[in-house]
Image (cartoon, coloured by chain):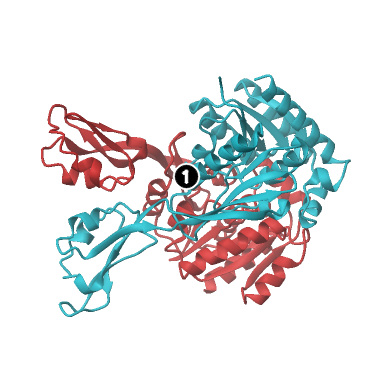
Chain colours: A cyan, B red
Amino acid sequence: MGKKHQELVIISGKGGTGKTSIVASFAALAGKCVLADCDVDAADLHLVLDPQVIRSEDFSGGKRASVITGKCTACGTCAQVCRFNAVTFDGPPNSRAEKTFRIDPIACEGCGVCSWFCEDSAIDFGPAVNGEWFVSETRHGPMVHARLGIAEENSGKLVSLVRKEAVNLAEERGIGLVVIDGSPGIGCPVIASITGADMVLVVTEPTVSGLHDLLRVADLTRHFATPAMVCINKWDLNPRVASEIEEQAGRQGLGIAGKVRYDRAVTKAQISRLSVVEYQDNGCSGDIRSVWKSVSSLMQSG
Amino acid sequence: MRKIAIASGKGGTGKTTVATNLAAVASRDSIRVAYLDCDVEEPNGALFLRPQIQEKWPVNVSVPGVEEGMCTGCGLCREICQYGAVAVVNRNVLVFPELCHGCAGCWMVCQTGALVESKRTIGRLEMGRADKVDFVQGILNIGEAMSPPVIREVKAAAADADLLIIDSPPGTSCPVIESIRDADYVLLVTEPTPFGLNDLVLAVETVRTLALPFGVLINRSDTGDGQTLDYCRKQDIEVLAEIPDDRRVAEAYSRGELACDAVQDYSAVFASLVKRLLKG
């Protein structure tokens, strides 16, 4: 038997094309689904879905090194072995040295090489808390979300964790669909959100940057063998580029799930803390409904 | 040289529009400008500045290479690696280069010479000129997870200039930190919507953590609500410019044109912003 749930991931390549607004509308249209906000370093879905947190946990994605000033003999081995320029010779004095070494927590990559090679056991290397994650209830179903700490690493690991918890929740509660809000770009958080998913919907916009970034994301979904479709948001802002996108997507074997018109109601809905399909029935809401219809029917047909 | 980073928590607020227009306008005012596209996952600056690329080269990172038959199965490499990038099976060491962060730990602890430093290409750098602007962009290869090494190379390749414009990726995590950490000033571009404000607050916390001077530009300032301006006032954050929504600018952007060329008056808007940014 295969798994009982399906995972739909919404990504965009380029930021600000309307991923989160589409996800919020899908949540309203799906009836029941588990939501996962995997845009962990700039999460916004909670602003519309008003989650009531029922569980919150610390996230530790790795370790971090710090000099125990009292034990440092200022030998400098740590600075020599660090590949990330994270060790500086500007720490406070101790009984042995006028200056000691110090590790910049922002530059530190958490490799622990400094600690390994320190002959005086003067570098502590222990788990770092890199963020928090939450399980919540929303009006459209349970939601797993997270907050990466400021200037923290390991966003890919946090994304994987959020996804895993969302899937667990789907199994526990017998919910068939997990809708995942991804992050912009093509790097580690995006890779962590799409690998092994059942369907990716790429939300793009009719601009030269939207097209450029769509093609890179399409390559990425192909690289990880994840089925993908395209939604052209605000398509009427430049119908010529929109049809160029349709043509290029077709050439790449990507289906067009639909086009959504530009509508200022999207911002108004956001200010009212509603998804746009809850905010109004007309305008772009009808377009989003038909995108949802084509994505969900394609997923059901497997 | 003054290094100005253009950043934002939320994507799509207009970073690249601001960065490319600033670069073009400043360069026409006989300021020596270098533009660095540090959004190496999705670099878009070239679509607007349209540089003549003169040089390209690969970006390599250090990864362990395996010398066959040398492994004694001691397991030290696996023990030091924090990223699960090496495994030891009997007397064979296996390497997963895509998980490697290049810390060098494994080949430094290897006593037998089974692991040695080797190189892997994860992206490329392109350099050239766009009119009077010195242009550098980094491009991360598809499927690669880690962009910071490419961003480091972009910044290292910057030519000497009076004004260095760093076009940062969106977000608040490692690629952003790498892009902005040594900037003299960070301009945070936002839009006055709930999403824009939520992500602006995160971006402000980030630049404050890094102790960098910063200010805010509110793009499409007449859309959304007044909360962003209230927040900036309460937090005593300087708002350097408010640019109203303008369909002509959006259309120029959609075609890959600079607003300062395509729409009247925008040259002056960005010229006064350049002046403010150079003041410190």
**Secondary structure category for the residue under label 1:** helix
Asked if residue B151 shows in the view, the reply is yes
Position above or below: B276 against A60: below
Residue A217 is drawn in which quadrant? top right
Relative placement, left or right, of B227 versus A195 is right
Residue pictured at 59% horizontal, 25% vertical? A227
- Disc 1: CA contacts within 10 A as few (<14), some (14-19) or many (>=20): many
Residue denoted by label 1: A156
Q: Residue furthest left?
A: B112
Relative placement, left or right, of A182 versus A73 is right
Observer-nearest residue: A127 or B280? Answer: A127
Q: Position of residue B26 (x, y in %)?
A: 56, 61
Asked if residue B41 shows in the view, the reply is no
Relative placement, left or right, of A100 versus B135 is left
Observer-nearest residue: B168 or A240? Answer: B168
Observer-nearest residue: A176 or A267? Answer: A176
Q: Position of residue B66 (x, y in %)?
A: 20, 32
Q: Residue furthest right?
A: A282
Position above or below: A189 against B203: above
Task: Please name the amino acid that badge 1 sits on.
Answer: Gly
* Subunit of label 1: A
